[in-house]
Image (cartoon, grey):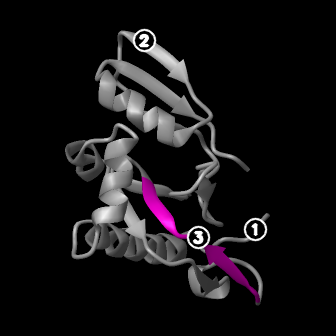
Amino acid sequence: MIATIDHTLWKRKAMAFAVRSHRHLWGKNNEDPLSFLYLKGISNNLAKSLYLGWNKFGQKRPLAGWGLEGEGEFFIPAGIVFPHIKEKDLLALVIIPMTPPYDAVPLPGSDPCPIILNPSGAADDKTSNDLLQALSLLEETQDTRITIPLPG
């Protein structure tokens, strides 16, 4: 658990990572993650609208470089990058591994608030503990509000 966060630095680093990973998903040699999303029921249009990205390789990053307390490092796993954006504000970065069990991993410094997909959805209100499954559900129905608690 990170005790102290420089939110300005974290958001700058997180936004740069999210933009790079989004460009990587839509760049060259991206067949694997795009196929993965398609097979999980997530269209290219939804992936683009949510600014999904792809982190091809796991990587270590220094805590201090991201505005996090400590001298050590944290690990960003390989996988699909989900930036939790609310009202143009990046609140969290979550990585969804492309291998089972597909458990979403929020990066250190991410806001632990629940993710709400389609907050204006009026017809139905659902909760899911599986971000990947929630994205697929969002693809199926546009009038369902889906809440996903972030693992802590």
Q: CA distance from mark 2 to mark 1?
A: 35 Å
Q: How many marks?
A: 3
The percent coordinates of residue 30 (x first, y second) are: 29, 68
In this view, 91 is above or below 1: above
Residue located 31% across and 45% down the image? 38
On whether residue 76 falls in the magenta region, the answer is yes
Where is mark 1, residue-wise? 2
The amino acid beneath tag 3 is Pro
Q: Earlier in the sequence, mark 2 or mark 3?
A: 3
Judging from the image, what secondary structure is the residue with disc 1 in? loop
Closer to the eye: label 2 or 3: 3
Closer to the eye: label 2 or 1: 2
The percent coordinates of residue 143 (x first, y second) are: 31, 18
On whether residue 35 falls in the magenta region, the answer is no
Disc 2, disc 3: CB below 8 Å?
Answer: no
Q: Residues within 10 Å of mark 3 (few under 14, many from 20)?
A: some
Judging from the image, what secondary structure is the residue with disc 2 in? strand
Where is mark 2, residue-wise? 124
The amino acid beneath tag 1 is Ile
In this view, 39 is above or below 142: below
**Magenta stretch in the rendered image:** 72-83
Between 21 and 42, which is closer to the camera in this rendering?
A: 42
Q: CA distance from mark 2 to mark 3?
A: 33 Å
